[in-house]
């Protein structure tokens, strides 16, 4: 069935207004990672509420849970007997790294070659606008939605959503819904819609090495004293996997193997190495670090990974000829079904602390709360409705994919809602550069997502009490 022509026409005729709405959100540097932009995070929450009201949502409010960053909430509950759809997005963003590589102002939404550039355009302010556009398209043309809607826009996703589960439990009755819709994942390619059915989890550790109380002149002690920075890198090098499995004892004992159906599905996806190298920005001569003949998709969706995301001992700008007494790094590990976060932490700790070079002191501790992986069976009425809706919105059959990223609340929220299906619809694509310079959103796919959401409301509305 899907949405009728008048609803879709509203999206087309108001596209310029929707771009301006997104531009207003992007213009606010709502960075949550450094603790220095709380004013801007609060400002974005207020603007999101303003845009919710404009779209036609009711009972709009800024909510907090304990010491959390602000959540924006709105609802429309005028469809008795119809399913209730929970919409999620987030209004906080990553900082501007590698400023010199940005080709335009990151806080000014800029259209270039069919893409909308700006920090947060794809991750995840574009989703806020897309969800509100689908709501407004119905309410402004029909005066009603075919489903009930509850929408939460979070303000601390980029720092691990540490208060989100508490917020959900605190407001359980208010938020209770039949189906969850999240637009914070990727499409396999531009123009090819995707529904994500698995997410990796994350375990991060802080590794610190100490060899002395003070730095010492390298002319006096170089070669005699243990170099903490070098010792740290010796320990980190134990994680080097070449093109085989990660050399961490028992790391793969619980990794769930792919089914034949999943293998066949991955094999049917485009495997253009030249394009993948370009998408990743790989330098000439640098090989992929894949395990054997594993594809990039299998490696990033269903294999665990270890990444050194930060390392420091001294700054290059203020470097001096000294033997450094301490060094530290953050090791981030993506985990997959059926790995247990606590076991992964202990496995990492064992590898990194055993027999340290020169007997240096090594400490390993958790860096932020671990997040469990999530996986669901992408079948049933809600998924069928999503597949049909994306087919209608994009003009092409969607594909079910995994994701190498982490969205920690999906599994716990689905359980809190009594096993509600979670539909993760793609908004990014391989060129989006989320978290990186020149983050962007493909304008055509963004419009297709809006159309898909308007169809989804109609198709879910036909399910009555058969959502699951």
Image (cartoon, helix red, strand yellow):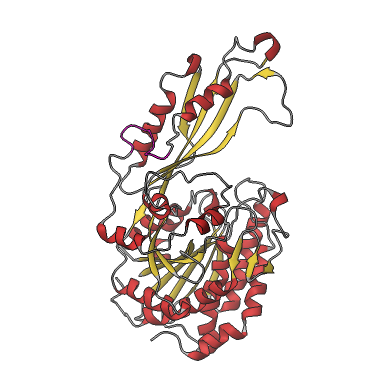
Q: In this view, does 118 lie above or below 214?
A: below
Q: Is residue 142 above or below residue 114?
A: below
User: Does the magenta stretch mainly form a helix, a strand or a loop?
Assistant: loop
Q: In which quarter of the image is the C terminus?
A: bottom left
339 or 80, which is in the foreground?
A: 339
x 65%, y 78%: residue: 17
Instruction: State the image coordinates of residue 240 (x, y, percent, origin top left).
Output: 45, 34
x 65%, y 72%: residue: 21
Q: Most extreme residue toward the front, as rendered?
A: 285
Q: Is residue 257 visible?
A: yes
Q: Quadrant of the N terminus?
A: bottom left
- Inspect the magenta stretch and tell me whether residue 18 lies in it: no
Q: What stretch is highlighted in magenta?
A: 243-251
Would you say 316 lies left or right of 331 here?
right
Instruction: State the image coordinates of residue 210 (x, y, percent, origin top left).
Output: 55, 20
x 72%, y 60%: residue: 104
294 or 131, which is in the foreground?
A: 294
Q: Is residue 68 visible?
A: no
x 74%, y 28%: residue: 318
Instruction: State the image coordinates of residue 218 (x, y, percent, origin top left).
Output: 68, 14
Instruction: State the image coordinates of residue 377 (x, y, percent, origin top left).
Output: 29, 62
Instruction: Specify the quadrant of the image occupied by residue 352.
Output: top left
Q: Most extreme residue toward the left, as rendered?
A: 260
82 or 460, which is in the foreground?
A: 460
Number of marks:
0
């Amino acid at each position: 069935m899907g949405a009728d022509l008048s609803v879709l026409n509203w999206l087309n005729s108001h596209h310029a207004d929707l771009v301006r709405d997104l531009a207003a959100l992007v213009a606010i540097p709502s960075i949550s990672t450094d603790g220095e932009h709380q004013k801007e995070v609060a400002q974005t929450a207020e603007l999101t509420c303003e845009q919710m009201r404009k779209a036609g949502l009711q009972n709009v409010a800024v909510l907090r849970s304990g010491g959390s960053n602000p959540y924006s909430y709105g609802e429309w509950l005028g469809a008795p007997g119809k399913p209730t759809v929970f919409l999620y997005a987030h209004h906080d963003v990553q900082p501007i790294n590698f400023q010199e590589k940005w080709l335009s102002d990151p806080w000014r939404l800029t259209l270039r070659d069919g893409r909308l550039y700006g920090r947060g355009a794809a991750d995840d302010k574009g989703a806020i606008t897309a969800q509100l556009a689908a709501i407004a398209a119905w309410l402004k043309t029909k005066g009603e939605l075919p489903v009930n809607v509850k929408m939460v826009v979070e303000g601390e996703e980029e720092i691990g959503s540490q208060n989100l589960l508490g917020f959900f439990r605190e407001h359980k009755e208010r938020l209770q819904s039949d189906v969850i819709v999240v637009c914070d994942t990727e499409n396999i390619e531009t123009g090819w819609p995707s529904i994500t059915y698995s997410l990796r989890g994350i375990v991060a550790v802080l590794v610190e090495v100490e060899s002395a109380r003070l730095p010492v002149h390298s002319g006096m002690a170089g070669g005699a004293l243990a170099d903490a920075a070098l010792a740290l890198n010796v320990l980190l090098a134990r994680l080097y996997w070449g093109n085989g499995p990660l050399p961490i004892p028992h790391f793969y004992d619980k990794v769930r193997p792919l089914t034949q159906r999943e293998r066949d599905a991955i094999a049917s996806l485009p495997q253009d190495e030249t394009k993948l190298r370009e998408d990743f920005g790989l330098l000439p001569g640098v090989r992929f670090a894949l395990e054997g003949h594993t594809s990039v998709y299998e490696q990033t969706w269903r294999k665990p990974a270890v990444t050194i995301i930060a390392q420091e001992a001294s700054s290059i700008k203020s470097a001096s000829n000294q033997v450094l007494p301490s060094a530290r790094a953050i090791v981030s590990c993506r985990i997959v079904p059926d790995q247990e976060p606590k076991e992964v932490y202990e496995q990492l700790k064992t590898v990194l602390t055993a027999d340290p070079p020169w007997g240096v002191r090594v400490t390993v501790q958790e860096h932020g709360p671990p997040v469990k992986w999530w996986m669901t069976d992408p079948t049933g009425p809600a998924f069928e409705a999503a597949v049909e809706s994306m087919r209608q919105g994009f003009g092409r059959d969607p594909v079910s994919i995994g994701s190498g990223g982490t969205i920690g609340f999906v599994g716990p929220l689905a359980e809190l809602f009594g096993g509600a299906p979670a539909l993760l619809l793609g908004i990014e694509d391989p060129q989006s550069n989320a978290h990186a310079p020149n983050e962007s959103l493909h304008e055509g796919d963004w419009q297709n997502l809006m159309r898909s959401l308007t169809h989804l409301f109609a198709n879910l509305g036909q399910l009555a009490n058969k959502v699951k």
